C-alpha cells in the first residue's frame, strides 16, 4: 500500500540565470492527499509543470508509476490527471464536448463523462459553451477532466481558486474520497494554509524553490510544541501552574495569561491534565485552532508572509 | 497510431468547429463560381457589344451593330467611289499624268495606276460584300468562330478575294495603257476567273470549290518556293480536318502549322521556327525525340479535333489566362489562405488560450500532436480541393461550352495519349496538394516558432502573396542553374505537370526569351522533389521548436 506512485528526485529548474526550483525531492503515496504549500512565486507551478511534461527539468528525475517521465513518456503519463494553473478549455465547445474530446484521447468510455460531470455537480450547465462559465465552473470542469480516465495520480495546482466556500468543501470531499476510497495519490498545491490543514494528510512546504520540509499534518503540531494546543480558562492560574509542576505533567505551557493557560499536551495526556487542572477552578476548555500556522511559521522561520 | 488517430479526430472536429473554416470554404465556392460567372458575363458583353451593342453612326444616331456596319459600308463605298474619280481625273486618256511634278515627290504615272487599282479592288470587294450580305468589317468573325455552333466559311471569302482582286485590278489598270506581258496575262486570267469563281461560291456555298480556289491562290502569292509548298501541304491537311467547312479554320490552323513545321524539321533533321523553313537550328537526338512527341500530339489533336478553343476565346476576351485556370486560381488561393490561417494559428492559438494544456497532459508525445494537427489541416486542404473540383466542373459546365473541356494530350516515345478532361483536372488539383502542403508546413513552422497567431498567419499570408507576384517576375528572368532553387518557381506544380506548352508561365517565358524553346523550363519532377525537401525542412523546424522546447 505504501509504495510510491509519484517520486520526485532532486528536481531543479533554471529560468534564465535564476534557479526557480532547486533540488526538490518528495514522494506521494496512494491513498493520501499531499499538500504542496508555499507563497506565491515559490515554484509550485514550476514543479507541477515539470511533472506534467510542460517543462523539461534541468536536473533530477520524475518517476510516475515507476516509469521515468523522460524515457517512457507515454507510459508514465498514462494514469496521471490534473490541472495546471487555471483550467483552460476550448471555449467554443460545451463543457461536455470538451470532456468528450479528452475522453477520446484516453479511449475512455462516453459513459464516464456522465459520471465525472455528476461527481463535480455540473449536470445543469454542462451543455453550455465554456466561454459562458465562471472561473469556479471551469475549475469544476477541470477537475472532471482530471478524473475522467480514472488516474491513480491526481495533481491539482491551486484548485480552490475561484471556488465559493461550498465549492471548496465539495472539492475537498472529492479529493479525500479519491485518496481515501479510490487509493489515488493526490497532490494539491496552495498558498493557503487553512485550506491545506483541512484537506491534506501530508504537507510539503516550498519556499524560494527549496523544499523546506515534508510532514504529517497530525504530527506537525507535535514537532513544534510537543502536542496539541489547548486553552484552559482557569479561576486560579498560579495554582494550576503549581499543580502541573507537582504532578510532573507532560503538558508544556505555551502561553500564560491572567485567566488562561495555553498548553501543548500529548494526545494521551489530555484526560489526566484536565482532571488535574479541575482543582484550580476549571472554567472552560478549548482546542486551539490555526495551529498549522504556528507550525508553518516555525518551519519557515517566520520570515515569509502567508496570504 | 491509435493515439494519433484520436488526436486527429479531435483536431478535425476543432477545425470544422471554427467559423473561419466554413467562411473561407464558402468564400472559395462563391468566388470560384463568381469568377466563372463574370467571365461569362464578359463574353456576353463582348458579344452584345459586337452585335447588339449600340453604335453611334455618322448622323449621331444610336443604331445596332448590323445597321451600323451596313451604313458604314455604304458611306465608305460612296466616298471611295468619289476618291477614285478624283484619282482617275489625274490621268490623260492616254494614261499620262496631267500635272507636272517637281523631282522631289517622284510620283509617276505607275504609282497613280496602282493607287487606282487598289481603290478599285477595295470598291469591288465592298460591292461584293453588299451583294452577298458578307461581313466586310469582320465584326462577326471572332464571335462566329468561337461561340456559334456552325461556322459560315463564306465569311472568309473576302479575305482570300483581296489577293485576287489586287492582282486583277492592277493588271486591268495597266492593260488599258499598255499590253501585258505573257506571265502577267496568265495571272490576269487566273485572277479574273477566280473572282468569278468567288461570286459563284458565295452564292452556292460550295466548300470544296472554295478549297480548290485557295490552293490556286497560292501561286499568286509572293514568297519563296518552300513556304508555298508548306501552304499547299497545310491546305491538304485542312481539307481533311475540316471536310464540311463548319469549323473555323482559325482554330485548325495552329495545329496544322505545327504539324507541317514539325514534319519538315524532322525530315530535314533541322529545327525550323515555321513551316516556311525559317530560323533553322541543328537538331540534337534529345530534341528530335521531343519534336516527335510534339508531332504525335499535334496529329492526335487534329485527328480528334481537339482544337484550342480556349486560347481563341481568350483572345476574344482579352484575358491572358484561360477561364478554367482563372477559376481554379481563385479557388485555390482562398483554399491556401484557409490553410495558412489554420496552420498558422493551430499551435500558437492553443498556447495563447492555454487549451494546449489538455493535450500536453494527455499521454501522447508532442510530435504526435504536431503530426495530428498537420494531418487534420491537410485533410481540410484535400476536402477543399474535392469541393473545388466539383465547383470547377459545375462552373465550367454552367458558364462555358463543353467543347472547351478537352482532354489532356501528351506523348511518350512518339505515341500520343489522352487523359479525359475531368480526370486530368482532378489529377492536377491532386498534384497541387504538394505546394499546399508546403505552405501548410511553412505556416505550422511559424506557428510553433513564434507562438504568436497574428505573426504566424500574417507572415505566411504575406509570404504567399509575395511569392505569387515574385514568382511571375522571376519567371521572366533568363533561365539559369541557380534560379531553380528559388521556391517561388515551384508552386505552380499542377500546371507544370499538365502543361501543354500553353500555360501562362510557358507563354510568358516564350514571349520573353523570344523563342519557343521550353527546354530550359524547370521540370515538374525537379519541382516536386524540391517542394518535398522544403516540406521536410519546415516540418523538422516545427518539430524541433514544438517538441524540444519548454512550454512555459
Ligand atoms: N516563464 C517564466 N519565465 C521566467 N520566470 C518564470 C516563468 N514562470 C515563472 N517564473 C518564475 O519562477 C518562479 C516560480 O514561479 P511559479 O512556479 O509560478 O510559482 P508559484 O506557482 O509557486 O506561485 C517565480 O519567481 C516566477 O517569477
Ligand atoms: Mg502557481
Image: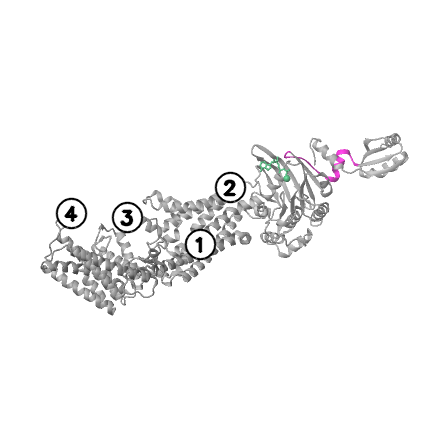
* Quadrant assignment for the C terminus of chain B: top right
Gap in angstroms between the C-alphas marked 4 and 3: 40 Å
Which of the two labelled residues, at mark 4 and mark 2, occupies the earlier sequence position? Answer: 4
Could you say which disc has been placed on residue B331 in the image?
Answer: 1
Sequence-wise, which precedes: disc 4 or disc 1?
A: 4
Secondary-structure class at tag 2 = helix
Badge 2 and badge 3 both on one subunit: yes
Say which residue label 2 marks: B450
- Looking at the rendered structure, the secondary structure element under dot 1 is helix
Magenta highlight on residue A226? yes
Discs 3 and 1 lie in a common subunit: yes
User: Is label 4 or label 1 in front?
Assistant: 4
Q: Secondary structure at mark 3?
A: loop
The span from disc 4 to disc 2 (Cα, nearest Å) is 79 Å
Locate residue A249, reporting x and y percent. 84, 33
Q: Which residue is mark 4?
A: B105
Q: Nearer the viewer, residue B339 or B9?
A: B339
Question: Label 4 neighbourhood size at 10 Å, few (<14), some (14-19), many (20+)?
Answer: few
**Segment tinted magenta in the rendering:** A208-228
**Quadrant location, ligand no. 2:** top right
Amino acid at each position: 500500500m505504501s509504495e510510491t506512485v509519484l517520486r520526485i528526485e532532486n528536481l531543479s529548474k533554471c529560468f534564465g540565470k535564476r534557479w526557480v526550483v532547486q533540488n526538490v525531492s518528495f514522494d506521494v503515496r496512494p491513498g493520501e492527499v499531499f499538500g504542496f504549500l508555499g507563497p506565491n512565486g515559490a515554484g509550485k507551478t514550476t514543479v507541477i509543470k515539470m511533472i506534467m511534461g510542460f517543462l523539461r527539468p534541468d536536473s533530477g528525475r520524475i518517476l510516475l508509476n515507476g516509469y521515468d517521465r523522460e524515457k517512457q513518456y507515454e507510459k508514465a503519463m498514462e494514469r496521471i490527471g490534473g490541472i495546471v494553473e487555471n483550467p483552460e478549455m476550448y471555449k467554443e465547445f460545451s463543457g461536455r464536448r470538451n470532456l468528450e474530446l479528452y475522453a477520446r484521447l484516453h479511449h475512455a468510455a462516453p459513459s464516464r463523462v456522465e459520471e465525472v460531470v455528476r461527481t463535480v455537480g455540473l449536470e445543469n450547465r454542462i451543455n453550455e459553451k465554456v466561454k459562458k462559465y465562471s472561473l469556479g465552473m471551469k475549475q469544476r470542469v477541470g477537475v472532471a477532466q482530471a478524473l475522467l480516465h480514472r488516474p491513480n495520480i491526481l495533481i491539482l495546482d491551486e484548485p480552490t481558486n475561484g471556488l465559493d466556500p461550498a465549492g471548496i468543501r465539495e472539492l475537498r470531499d472529492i479529493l479525500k474520497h479519491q485518496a481515501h476510497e479510490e487509493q489515488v495519490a493526490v497532490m494539491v498545491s496552495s498558498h493557503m494554509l487553512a485550506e491545506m490543514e483541512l484537506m491534506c494528510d501530508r504537507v510539503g512546504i516550498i519556499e524560494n524553490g527549496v523544499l523546506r520540509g515534508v510532514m504529517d499534518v497530525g504530527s506537525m503540531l507535535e514537532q513544534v510544541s510537543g502536542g496539541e494546543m489547548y486553552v484552559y480558562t482557569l479561576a486560579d492560574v498560579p495554582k494550576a501552574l503549581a499543580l502541573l509542576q507537582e504532578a510532573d505533567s507532560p503538558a508544556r505551557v505555551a502561553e500564560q495569561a491572567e485567566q488562561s493557560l495555553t498548553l501543548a499536551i500529548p494526545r494521551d495526556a489530555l484526560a489526566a491534565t484536565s482532571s488535574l487542572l479541575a482543582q484550580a477552578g476549571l472554567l472552560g476548555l478549548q482546542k486551539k485552532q490555526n495551529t498549522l500556522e504556528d507550525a508553518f511559521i516555525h518551519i519557515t522561520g517566520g520570515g515569509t508572509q502567508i496570504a | 497510431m491509435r493515439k494519433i488517430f484520436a488526436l486527429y479526430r479531435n483536431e478535425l472536429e476543432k477545425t470544422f468547429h471554427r467559423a473561419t473554416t466554413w467562411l473561407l470554404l464558402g468564400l472559395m465556392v462563391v468566388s470560384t463560381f463568381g469568377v466563372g460567372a463574370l467571365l461569362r458575363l464578359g463574353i456576353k458583353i463582348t458579344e452584345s457589344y459586337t452585335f447588339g451593342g449600340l453604335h453611334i453612326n455618322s448622323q449621331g444616331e444610336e443604331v445596332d451593330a448590323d445597321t451600323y456596319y451596313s451604313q458604314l459600308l455604304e458611306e465608305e463605298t460612296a466616298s471611295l467611289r468619289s476618291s477614285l474619280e478624283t484619282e482617275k481625273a489625274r490621268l490623260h486618256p492616254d494614261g499620262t499624268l496631267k500635272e507636272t511634278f517637281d523631282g522631289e515627290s517622284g510620283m509617276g504615272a505607275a504609282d497613280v495606276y496602282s493607287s487606282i487599282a487598289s481603290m478599285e479592288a477595295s470598291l469591288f470587294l465592298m460591292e461584293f460584300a453588299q451583294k452577298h450580305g458578307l461581313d466586310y468589317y469582320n465584326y462577326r468573325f471572332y464571335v462566329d468562330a468561337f461561340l456559334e455552333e456552325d461556322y459560315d466559311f463564306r465569311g472568309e471569302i473576302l479575305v482570300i478575294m483581296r489577293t485576287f482582286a489586287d492582282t486583277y485590278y492592277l493588271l486591268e489598270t495597266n492593260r488599258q495603257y499598255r499590253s501585258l506581258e505573257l506571265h502577267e496575262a496568265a495571272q490576269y486570267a487566273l485572277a479574273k476567273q477566280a473572282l468569278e469563281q468567288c461570286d459563284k461560291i458565295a452564292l452556292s456555298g460550295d466548300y470544296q470549290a472554295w478549297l480548290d480556289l485557295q490552293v490556286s491562290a497560292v501561286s499568286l502569292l509572293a514568297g519563296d518556293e518552300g513556304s508555298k509548298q508548306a501552304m499547299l501541304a497545310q491546305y491538304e491537311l485542312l481539307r481533311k480536318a475540316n471536310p464540311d467547312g463548319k469549323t473555323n479554320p482559325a482554330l485548325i490552323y495552329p495545329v496544322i502549322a505545327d504539324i507541317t513545321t514539325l514534319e519538315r524539321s524532322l525530315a530535314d533533321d533541322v529545327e525550323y521556327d515555321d513551316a516556311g523553313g525559317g530560323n533553322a537550328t541543328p537538331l540534337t537526338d534529345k530534341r528530335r525525340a521531343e519534336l516527335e512527341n510534339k508531332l504525335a500530339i499535334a496529329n492526335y489533336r487534329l485527328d480528334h479535333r481537339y482544337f484550342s478553343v480556349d486560347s481563341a476565346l481568350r483572345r476574344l476576351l482579352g484575358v491572358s489566362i484561360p477561364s478554367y485556370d482563372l477559376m481554379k486560381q481563385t479557388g485555390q488561393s482562398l483554399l491556401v489562405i484557409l490553410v495558412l490561417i489554420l496552420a498558422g494559428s493551430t499551435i500558437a492559438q492553443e498556447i495563447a488560450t492555454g487549451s494546449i494544456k489538455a493535450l500536453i497532459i494527455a499521454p501522447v508525445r508532442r510530435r504526435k500532436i504536431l503530426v495530428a494537427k498537420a494531418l487534420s489541416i491537410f485533410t481540410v486542404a484535400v476536402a477543399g480541393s474535392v469541393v473545388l473540383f466539383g465547383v470547377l466542373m459545375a462552373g465550367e459546365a454552367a458558364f462555358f461550352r463543353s467543347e472547351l473541356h478537352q482532354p489532356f494530350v501528351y506523348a511518350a516515345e512518339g505515341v500520343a495519349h489522352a487523359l479525359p478532361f475531368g480526370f486530368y483536372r482532378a489529377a492536377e488539383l491532386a498534384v497541387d496538394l504538394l505546394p499546399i502542403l508546403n505552405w501548410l508546413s511553412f505556416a505550422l513552422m511559424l506557428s510553433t516558432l513564434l507562438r504568436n497567431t497574428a505573426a504566424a498567419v500574417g507572415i505566411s499570408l504575406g509570404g504567399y502573396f509575395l511569392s505569387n507576384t515574385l514568382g511571375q517576375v522571376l519567371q521572366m528572368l533568363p533561365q539559369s542553374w541557380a534560379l531553380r532553387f528559388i521556391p517561388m518557381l515551384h508552386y505552380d506544380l499542377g500546371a507544370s505537370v499538365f502543361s501543354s506548352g500553353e500555360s501562362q508561365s510557358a507563354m510568358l517565358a516564350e514571349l520573353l526569351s523570344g523563342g519557343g524553346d521550353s527546354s530550359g523550363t524547370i521540370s515538374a519532377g525537379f519541382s516536386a522533389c524540391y517542394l518535398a525537401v522544403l516540406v521536410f525542412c519546415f516540418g523538422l523546424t516545427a518539430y524541433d521548436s514544438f517538441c524540444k522546447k519548454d512550454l512555459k
